[in-house]
Amino acid sequence: MKKQKLNPQPSIRWNITYTMGINYSEPLSYFRKSSSVGRIDKIPEEAPSVEHRPITQEDDNGKYCCVKYLSQGSFGSVVLATVYGDNQHYALKVITTNKFNTIEVNILKDMKEIPGVLQYIEVFETENNVVIVTEFCKGQELFDYIYNKGPLSEKTAKYIFRQLCIAMHIAHNKGIVHRDLKPENIIINNQHIVTIIDWGFAFYPSKTIERKRCGSPNYAAPEILGNAKYGSEIDVWSLGCILYTMLTGRLPFDNNNISELFNDIKACSVDYNVNLNEGAIDLLRAIFTIQNRITITGILNDRWLDWH
Ligand SMILES: Nc1ncnc2c1ncn2[C@@H]1O[C@H](COP(=O)(O)OP(=O)(O)O)[C@@H](O)[C@H]1O
Ligand SMILES: [Mg+2]
């Protein structure tokens, strides 16, 4: 199987993306460069543009002061901010009002105090935007960490993976599915403590019949590609993609041709001919399957993961 260097992956709603005419034969890193300045080491030092400065200064409380951009996406932008008279940092997700979906806030509120999950502070509206205030996670995206370091040691990968599984186990027990788990949506600090961010595609499978095709194609489970009534098992698949990427420095499913990529995913066609411990391969095989996929509880009881 042809393997490529690790590239950042855009999060999308696929039907919208197609109508926007994004061409998947482009190298995927192209999207990242054009749509985001999210690399934490590359944030411009100057304050945000004039266009954004009033958004937070004229809010109801008038308390947030923008420091710099963390990211600019199609929905709006993420800004690092402080509170006047305080040196505490916050992340402000500034979303154009017509692209805002209350579910992201409801879900963040529902997950307060879960270790490893982005902590919600408050939400407020301005003239054209909705601003979600959360903790600011110091560190870098897990994507950049893997990209710069190459494959992680088994010990580090297990340590990170276990934290992700514990956090997602609690989220799933609350009936919440993230739907866009990938290294770009995980912040890792210098002690390898992780925080799962970007709950913009999250949903409650038991409360809605909605089953969008969304997330990031390379991390998407086969059920999302069909018309199946999927649930939390799709996050398990994405966690498997993250584990594989941490251990090998490569995506398990990687093809610039979108229909070939989808065929590989549906066929669970993963290259296991990599230099990995047998226990890790057994766990990945238990994840990358359509029938009887292992659950998060099963993963947390897995011998390889438990074995230091
Ligand atoms: N709370 C936060 N702390 C630190 N960085 C953040 C935070 N929220 C977002 N970011 C940065 O901004 C990027 C985009 O934010 P995200 O919520 O993932 O929105 P998008 O929908 O554009 O992917 C993230 O990948 C991360 O680099
Ligand atoms: Mg994101």
Image (cartoon, rainbow, N blue to C red):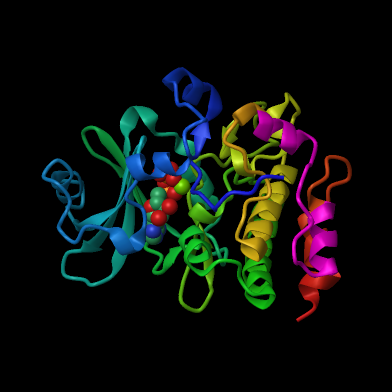
From this viewpoint, which residue is outermost toward the left?
50
* Residue in the foreground of this view, choosing between 203 and 140: 140
- The residue positioned farthest toward the right in the image shown: 292
Residue at left 73%, top 26%?
A: 226
Q: Is residue 203 left or right of residue 104?
A: right
**Which residue is rendered at x = 56% and y = 67% of the image?**
115
Please give left or right for residue 221 compared with residue 198 in the image. right
Q: Decide if residue 97 is in sight here.
A: yes
Determine if the magenta segment contains residue 72.
Answer: no
Please tell me how many numbered marks the rendered image carries.
Answer: 0
Residue at x 57% of width, y 33% of height? 214
Which of the 4 image quadrants contains residue 229?
top right
Query: The N terminus is located in which quarter?
Result: top right
Q: Position of residue 254 (x, y in %)?
A: 63, 43
Q: Residue at x 57, y 44 (%)?
A: 180
Q: Position of residue 82 (x, y in %)?
A: 23, 63
Q: Is residue 234 above or below residue 134?
A: above
Q: Which residues are magenta?
A: 260-286
User: From the viewer's perspective, is 146 left or right of 253?
Assistant: left
Q: Is residue 222 visible?
A: no
Question: In this rendering, is residue 25 above or below 275?
Answer: above
- The answer to whether 83 appears left or right of 248 in the picture is left
The furthest residue to the top: 19
Residue 151: percent from left, percent from top:
60, 67
Magenta span includes 270: yes
Image quadrant holding the C terminus, namely bottom right
